[in-house]
Image (tube, grey):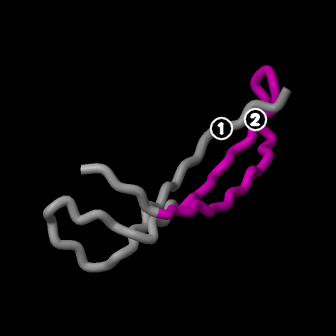
Amino acid sequence: MHGTAATGQFGGGIEVGTQLKLLLPIGVRGEFGNFCTLENFSFGVPVQCAEQHNLVVSGGLVVHF
């Protein structure tokens, strides 16, 4: 089965510097995103709504040089 659907993406994040310095200054970053589809393919399984939201949360260490 092949098909196409309109999608969109939005998100945001923040980066915070720390006093931690190993060889280079270290920071901390966190971000989130939402991938939205306006049409949801059922693939033979009943679904409750037409659109689908996939939330993504991530974070990590940042090395500044």
Callout 2: SS = strand
Residue furthest toward the bottom? 48
> Pointers 1 and 2 in contact (CB under 8 A)?
yes
**Among the 4 quarters of the image, the one containing residue 13:** bottom right
The reply, left or right, for residue 52 in relation to residue 21 is left
Q: Residues within 10 Å of mark 1 (few under 14, many from 20)?
A: few
Residue type, mark 2 in image = Ile
- Residue ID at (35%, 55%): 3
Q: Which residues are magenta?
A: 6-34
Q: CA distance from mark 1 to mark 2?
A: 7 Å
Camera-side residue of 62 and 45: 45
Q: Which residue is mark 2?
A: 26
Residue 59 rendering spot, x and y as whole percentages: 58, 47
* Pointer 2 local density, CA inside 10 Å: few below 14, some 14–19, many at least 20: some
Most common SS among magenta residues: strand
Q: Which quadrant is home to the C terminus?
A: top right
Horizontal and vertical percent for residue 5? 43, 61
Report the residue marked by disc 1.
Answer: 61
Name the residue at the right extreme: 65
